[in-house]
Amino acid sequence: MKKKIQFSLLYRDMWQSSGKFQPRKDQLERIAPVIIEMGCFARVETNGGAFEQVNLLAGENPNDAVRAFCKPFNEVGIKTHMLDRGLNALRMYPVPDDVRQLMYKVKHAQGTDITRIFDGLNDIRNIAPSIQWAKEAGMTPQGALCITTSPVHTLEYYSRLADEEIAAGAEEICLKDMAGIGQPAFLGQLTKMIKTNHPDILIEYHGHSGPGLSMASMLEVCENGADIIDTAIEPLSWGKVHPDVISVQSMLKHAGFEVPEINMDAYMEARALTQEFIDDWLGYFINPQNKFMSSLLLGCGLPGGMMGSMMADLGGIQSVINNLKKKKGEPELTTDDMLVKLFDEVAYVWPRVGYPPLVTPFSQYVKNIALFNLLTLEQGKGRYVMMDDSVWGMILGKSGKVPGELAPEIVELAKAQGREFTDADPHTLIPNALDDFRKEMDDNGWDYGQDDEELFELAMHPEQYRNYKSGQAKKNFLADLQKAKDAKLGAQVSLEEAAAFKHAKADAIVAPVKGQLFWEFQGDAEAAPAVEPFIGKAYKEGDAFCFIQAPWGEFVEVPAALGGKLVEINAKQGSKVNKGEVIAYIEREHKD
């Protein structure tokens, strides 16, 4: 018999790759004993990534949920692990060193054993400090390699990164195949290289089902020395998620590996409970398209977990583009037409911005560049017109070094806009922040919580935590849930039916991110917003039109396109807007 293979259940990622929210604390407490009873899992992913953030958005304390979910696994010796975005920790933008360091102390105290540390650029400078802090806090640091397929992502590239992570103190290596586009033979060779160089290092494979390669990849990595395979369970397995543990177990068992047996009674109970959670409320936030696999993902390399939000974004842009085409007397584009165009544009943009591995947040950045390029190309403005500071941060080196070379057109555009490139260590660019958050806790009379976990939550997700404490998050969530229920019942009209007639010579001002809209600010984005602009107000090219506070707290400036006269407003002060939604129309001055 071949070597022993262990399984990990990606219960958190199953939900994140399917929809918006995670199960509540009481639901996690119900499912944990059943997962244990299945008897086949050596590990369970309990938290990390967006888990804490989305719990806050639902008005629930995530610290209570993490402790409750981890406890039964801790008691029986099943290892718990979390997803950790390195420089970005648990959010979409960089986190100060002192907040990152606190995270490991808090998460270890809450019962999380292993942290999977990845960086969207595979920059060791963003990973090494997290490895050190995790070890100091008593956690097992697992260094991740973000897998993608490009001319610069060679076997030698990944083998060298594994060497660097292990030298920095990583005790395990994860092949993080977040889009499922890693080629099986390549992954097998890479596993063998790492095992040859580091025979005592445990290797875990994480591959999404999206384009359909992950089962073959699992067999290849196991044949070449992998130790643990990440899996899912029905009704959330397959699609854009992960292969089901039953299929993985069967495949490896028949290939001669030693694998654990599955208690099928417990599996069916876990399956039924998960479906109950979907039917209860979580299903209202799950995009049905995420249940389907798609070979198209091989061409663009985008992670399957992004497909739900991407299709929503695409729908908003599609309606704007089709409106423009209608005015020009051109045939409108179907959703399939738009999807192919978007994937083609991603393929065009990706090498030109240096082949960043398409994982959070850089997958979103590349997709956003491509998506808005489709709009601005249709408007006759060319490419790269609507890139925000986060996207530029990736390009300029503020988030780390992109693996490939930037195209001359990108470098020239940066110089033309007076932007400066940097090769500084990214975490040195961010000042510490805990003292300010301690003061806020003290001023509000808020308790720091067990093991400083409430202080950590405020520091990691400031805006969401404040909304949680005020009760506003729960109100917003209940309103969103009712809206989702109404939409499912057909009580709301579709986006197409709701779209109003737009002015023939006007440019659409489109929300670059989802969030809360604010008009001009007095002084800065934290100050009280001014009144809504008036119809007829004139703007110059490059003027700030409005600001959107993204779900992660950042204020994103929305430019006034190429300038002109404001002719229509579609959103009110403080309203919630979706990415790709038209905020207003500005009519340019046309000279015949």
Image (cartoon, rainbow, N blue to C red):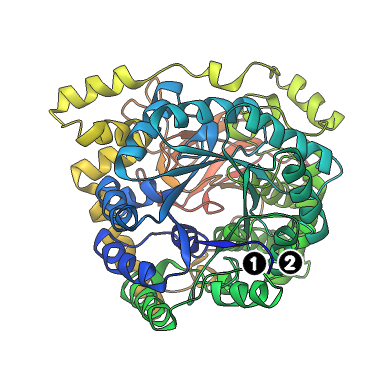
Quickly name the residue at label 1.
209
Residue 590, label in figure: none
Q: Residue at x 36, y 43 (%)?
A: 573
Identify residue type, mark 2: Leu
User: How far apart, in angstroms, are the residues tagged by discs 1 and 2?
Assistant: 7 Å
Neighbor class of circle 2 (other Cα within 10 Å; few <14, some 14-19, many 20+) is some
Question: In x, y percent, where is residue 48?
Answer: 44, 46
Q: Work out which residue is located at the far front of the displayed protein and give it.
A: 1
- The reply to whether residue 471 is in sight is yes
Question: In x, y percent, where is residue 210?
Answer: 66, 66
Q: Is mark 2 on a helix, strand or loop?
A: loop
Neighbor class of circle 1 (other Cα within 10 Å; few <14, some 14-19, many 20+) is many
Q: Residues at badges 1 and 2 in contact (C-beta under 8 Å)?
A: no
Identify residue type, mark 1: Ser
- Give the position of the N terminus as an image quadrant: bottom right
Quickly name the residue at label 2.
213
Q: Which residue is drawn at 71% across and 54% down?
A: 225
